[in-house]
């Protein structure tokens, strides 16, 4: 058996490895507190579940779905963008349904990147951007996200020859894994940069609705002229607690949406129409009240965890977006080594920052996906294990 050479360049998917190790420890009787994978522990809205129950009984939905997404689903996405971001979208040409945003992000790379082309990727970042760039034969250029820059990329630091070769610029704010946020001024600079360099921006807006302390995340499409150079993915996974449903959309530049559609129609057959109907119904029952309720929960968890870690010597600010905390590791330790200490000495799973890129070294990511009681217990276990920042 001879596997494709491209597979050799791809490291094992970190979350699959973590899940395997977690299951091994649980099988040994360890009470594991899993703060590694960003998978909400809270329920999907009741009305979405109820609508799904009705939708699966509709015989027309038993057949193949529309490749680009059901017309009602694409219209629901366009209506939501008008309401939420004051952005006008043509449902027919500027919206395509996705089988989760991960699929769309990966397929967009296949639509635009030829061997040797450069893709501008944040470092650290969601691993899919780099992995699929490598699979296409593209050249990832890693843009450092540094604390002193608020974990925003410095476009001026990108070499001129790299800019000329670049096809896509990936952005993701609120950010995974750093939990940093970006305002419209940053997105204006990004759009201007993309126009000057003739490249496509893909903004992964998976955490748009998970914000705190008065911050409200924008869409890049709010910038004048952004649709000339930008496509954005919007996912139901995190804001509606629907990770397992695998439903999202890509919206924005019509040419990019069409190119993505070509890859999709030759790769998958679209998402089950009943799921699209249930997702569309998510917008029908005051979703912003639901987001506010969820964010109160996550804010409480954030405060418990950050305050607890700061009592152990950390000096972290409380993030204003996502449900992650980007935790610096104690001096002299690596991200992998510190994650191992947390796991073996305290039974607490965290993700090594190096898994997200070289500039993730020196940090671990904590997902606030357990209740406040378990977060307090996690901090107490770390304290009893002698974990200190200073």
Image (cartoon, rainbow, N blue to C red):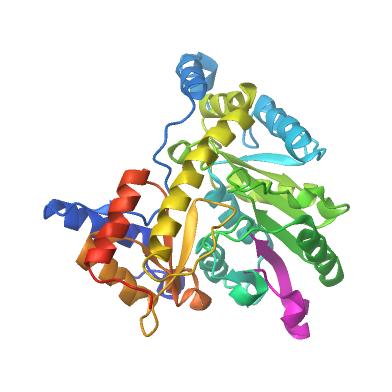
Residue under the image location 69 percent in, 46 percent down = 216
Residue 279 percent coordinates (x, y): 57, 29
Residue at the limit of the structure toward the left, as seen here: 28
152 relative position to 37: left or right = right
Name the quadrant of the C terminus. bottom left
Residue 307 percent coordinates (x, y): 43, 58
**Residue 328 seen in render:** yes
Q: Look at the picture and state if 143 lies above or below 201.
A: below
389 relative position to 76: left or right = left
**Residue 146 seen in render:** no
Of 253 and 307, the residue lying toward us = 307
Residue under the image location 86 percent in, 70 percent down = 196
Residue under the image location 43 percent in, 39 percent down = 244
Report the span colored magenta: 151-171
Residue at the limit of the structure toward the front, as seen here: 311
Name the quadrant of the N terminus. bottom left
């Amino acid at each position: 058996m001879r596997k494709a050479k491209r597979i050799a360049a791809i490291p094992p998917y970190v979350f699959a490895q973590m899940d395997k190790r977690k299951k091994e420890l649980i099988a040994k009787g360890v009470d594991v507190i899993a703060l590694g994978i960003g998978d909400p522990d809270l329920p999907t809205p009741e009305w979405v579940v109820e609508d799904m129950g009705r939708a699966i009984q509709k015989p027309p939905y038993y057949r193949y779905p529309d490749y680009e997404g059901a017309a009602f689903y694409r219209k629901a996405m366009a209506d939501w963008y008008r309401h939420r971001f004051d952005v006008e979208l043509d449902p027919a040409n500027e919206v395509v349904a996705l089988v989760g945003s991960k699929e769309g992000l990966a397929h967009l790379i296949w639509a635009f990147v030829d061997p040797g082309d450069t893709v501008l990727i944040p470092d650290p970042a969601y691993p899919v951007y780099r992995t699929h760039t490598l699979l296409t034969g593209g050249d990832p250029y890693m843009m450092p996200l540094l604390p002193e820059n608020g974990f925003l990329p410095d476009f001026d630091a990108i070499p001129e020859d790299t800019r000329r070769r670049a096809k896509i610029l990936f952005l993701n704010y609120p950010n995974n894994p750093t939990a940093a946020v970006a305002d419209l001024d940053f997105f204006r600079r990004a759009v201007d940069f993309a126009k000057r360099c003739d490249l496509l921006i893909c903004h992964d807006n998976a955490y748009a609705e998970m914000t705190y302390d008065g911050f409200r995340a924008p869409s890049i499409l709010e910038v004048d002229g952004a649709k000339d150079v930008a496509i954005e993915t919007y996912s139901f996974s995190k804001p509606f607690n629907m990770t397992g449903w695998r439903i999202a959309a890509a919206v924005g530049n019509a040419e990019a949406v069409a190119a993505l559609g070509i890859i999709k129609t030759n790769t998958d057959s679209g998402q089950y129409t009943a799921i699209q109907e249930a997702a569309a119904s998510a917008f029908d029952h005051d979703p912003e009240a639901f987001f506010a309720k969820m964010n109160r929960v996550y804010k409480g968890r954030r405060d418990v965890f950050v305050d607890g870690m700061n009592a152990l010597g950390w000096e972290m600010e409380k993030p204003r977006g996502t449900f992650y905390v980007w935790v610096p590791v104690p001096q002299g330790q690596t991200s992998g080594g510190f994650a191992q200490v947390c796991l073996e000495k305290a039974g607490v799973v965290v993700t090594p920052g190096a898994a997200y890129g070289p500039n993730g070294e020196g940090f671990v990511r904590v997902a606030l996906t357990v209740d406040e009681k378990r977060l307090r217990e996690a901090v107490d276990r770390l304290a009893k294990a002698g974990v200190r920042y200073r």
